[in-house]
Amino acid sequence: MPRAKNAVASRARRKKVLSQTRGNFGARKNVWTVAKNTYEKGLTYAYRGRKKKKSEFRALWIQRINAAVRMEGLSYSKFMGLVHKAEVNMNRKVLADLAMNQPEAFKAIVAKVKELA
């Protein structure tokens, strides 16, 4: 009985990986073993990056809130403590967006938090 190598599926699988490594330098784009390693490493970087993106955005929101709150004479930590004490149910993403795009609304929140504390 002849040996079945399944060349069509193997070639398709390799072609898919090689198309994903298009744009890499040298052997990383066209030598199968090197390209496969590059591709797999890229997938781990992508996975790690999706996790890291969340902490980077949180840090950005904190910086924006801090900058806006300091103009009102508070620090970020004091403001967030007052927000929790006043039971204002807004997360950092919403607060940062208000601070950037609607400063009057943010000032109203700061005033409300200051008077409740």
Image: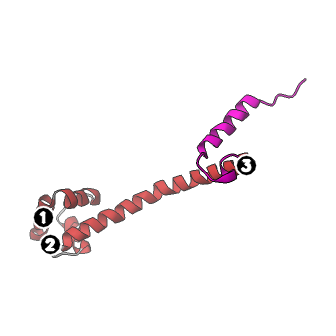
Q: Earlier in the sequence, mark 3 or mark 2?
A: 3
SS class of the residue under badge 2? Answer: loop
Residue 72 pos. (x, y %): 14, 72
Residue picked out by circle 1: 107
The residue lying at 69 percent from left, 46 percent from top is 30
Q: What span is in magenta?
A: 1-30
In the displayed structure, 109 sits above or below 114; it is above
In the displayed structure, 117 sits above or below 34; it is below
Disc on res. 44: none
Q: How is the image coloured?
A: secondary structure
Residue 93 pos. (x, y %): 28, 57
Residue picked out by circle 3: 33
Q: Quadrant of residue 80?
A: bottom left
Residue picked out by circle 2: 72
The residue lying at 24 percent from left, 56 percent from top is 94
Q: Neighbour class for label 3 at 10 Å: few (<14), some, many (≥20)?
A: some
